[in-house]
Amino acid sequence: CQDVKNFAPEELSVKVVGRKVVLVGQKETQSTDEKGSFSYKYEVLKREWDVPEEVDAEALTCSLSKDGQLRIEAPKLALPAAPERSVPIQVSPAAPQTGPASENGA
């Protein structure tokens, strides 16, 4: 979850770019006080997360709670079960012995 309570839903965007999720929030506030002073405030929030290879980025969803928590979810990909097979063990022939015993013909 990402805390975005300072932003209205229309000020937020979530995009999938390649294998990244990008969250951007932009907010402008303008006000004039009783003395005629003008203030302008611009807030930007940007977060990026890598999408793991085993996650289906195409099925990504977002939900925003009433208390300003943005939840980004995506299911894991259904990976095919790896086929099982037996691997034969090959026995290598014994290496010829070298040394004093083999040199004497023993």
Image (tube, rainbow, N blue to C red):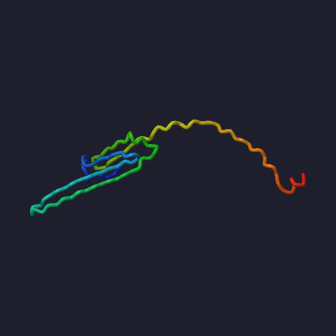
Where on the picture, by quarter, is residue 61? top left
Residue 52: x, y in percent? 44, 47
The answer to whether 81 is drawn above or below residue 50 in the figure is: above
In-image side of 83 versus 29 (left or right): right
Which residue is nearer to you in this view: 3 or 15? Answer: 15
Q: What residue is at 32 percent from the left and 44 percent from the top?
A: 63
Q: Which residue is drawn at 32% across and 48% down?
A: 70
Q: Could you tell whether 41 is left or right of 63 in the image?
A: left
On the image, the x and y values in percent for residue 91 come to: 74, 42
Q: Nearer the viewer, residue 34 or 50?
A: 50
- Tell whether 94 sits left or right of 10: right
Q: Is residue 106 visible?
A: no
Where residue 48 sits in the image (x, y, percent)? 37, 52
The reply to whether residue 85 is visible in this rendering is yes
Residue 65 spot, x, y in % from top left? 30, 46
Kindly identify the residue that appears in the image at 34 percent across and 53 percent down. 47
**In the depicted structure, whether residue 103 falls above or below residue 83:** below
Residue 57 vertical position relative to residue 6 in the rendered view, above or below: above
| Vertical comparison of 72 with 36: above or below | above
Name the residue at 31% across, 49% down: 69
Numbered-mark total = 0
Residue farthest left in this picture: 35
